[in-house]
Amino acid sequence: MSSIRFMQQKASNATALAVKGIHRRSLIVSANEAHRPVVQIPVFHRQYSASPAIQSSSNTAIRQRPIYVCATRQHVGKTSVSLALISHFTKRFGSENVGYIKAVGQQCMRVWDEPLDANDEAGQYVLVDKDVKLIRDHFGLSHLRYQDMSPVLIPQGYTKSYLDGEINHQDQTADIRRAYLNIVQATKLGGGNRNNNSITVCEGTGHVGVGSIVGSGNARVAAELGADVVLVANGGLGSAFDELELNRALCLQYGVNIAGVVINKVQPDKYDQTREYLRKAIGQMWKGPNGEPAPPVLGVVPDRPYLGCPALADVESTFGTVLLSGSDHRYRHYDVGSNVQG
């Protein structure tokens, strides 16, 4: 049983439309790396199939290496880094050539998934991770199906059902691989069948080990997809490097390449110190066994408290309204505490 079937069993009649029509069948799933053979995997899953173009080319491995954004713990800036990467890639390649997937999600919401073409099934309500809704809507990734962007959800009770054998690990992994292949195919078709300027960003959940109890930890999923990992950590020296080292160990265990590190929320007065010494530490201690260079520090981001304060645009979005005046200040941030009379 996949996570979607689990969600269906737990859903009330009012929300059962979100995950309907689950059945058993055998699909051909092509591997992400050339050394992985094409295998037949019998699966229980949401009622959708791989795109026809993927099925017709199942003997060809898709070699695109996605970027998998992981963190050393929760709330360090994974989604912020994912937003920055997708913003860059959409500007460079065009939104139709950019993919996004959150393979394992926890906090979900119900959305309407429109059919993309005549070969798609009719539209249906689906449950997706809340970050998927944010990313798809903000960047206009309408060429991607919601159900592909959020293949596995872990609601309350999922872990016990997995350990009791009610959810099959092979089915769960097949859902992730199939959804990723659909995302890759959708981005490649955006620029034609020979499009080489496409990229997929995968966002993890929590630290690298989150999801391990249900066989879908971030490092394991990244290895399954053949992804390069970008590790995000909060500012500091000793504590930051210690957390990075712990998470790196799990990546090494699964043979996952760390492409780079982003240090977020650095105290402004310690910005130069943090950048200099973390680069030294990583450069000296993360070299490969044969002298390969250590992964680079891709960015050091200072902490700006005002970014946590709401802007007028947030008020517009929250109340579903439009400013009557002051539109020039829509993105100005306000310190709510200092402006509220007690």
Image (tube, rainbow, N blue to C red):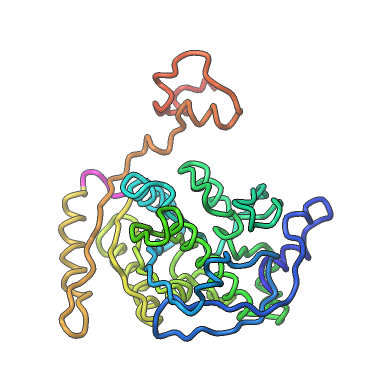
User: What residue occupies the far top of the structure in this picture?
Assistant: 325
Pick the residue in front: 210 or 100.
100
Q: Which residue is pictured at 52% across the width and 19% down the height?
A: 323
Percent of width and height locating residue 243 = 35, 67
Percent of width and height locating residue 205 = 49, 62
Q: Is residue 13 left or right of residue 62?
A: right
Q: Locate the C terminus and report the quarter of the image it occupies.
A: top right
Percent of width and height locating residue 142 = 53, 47
User: What residue occupies the far right of the structure in this picture?
Assistant: 13
**Count of number-bearing discs:** 0
Q: Is residue 163 left or right of residue 8?
A: left
Against 25, residue 202 (above or below) is above
Q: Which residue is pictured at 24% across the width and 44% down the height?
A: 268
Pick the residue in front: 156 or 4.
4
**Residue 268 is one of the magenta-drawn residues:** yes
Residue 47 figure quarter: bottom right
Percent of width and height locating residue 272 = 16, 50
**Residue 157 is one of the magenta-drawn residues:** no
Against 251, residue 233 (above or below) is above
Q: Locate the N terminus and report the quarter of the image it occupies.
A: bottom right
Q: Which residue is pictured at 50% across the width and 31% down the height?
A: 314
Pick the residue in front: 144 or 14.
144
**Bounds of the magenta segment:** 265-269
Residue 285 figure quarter: bottom left
Against 18, residue 30 (above or below) is below
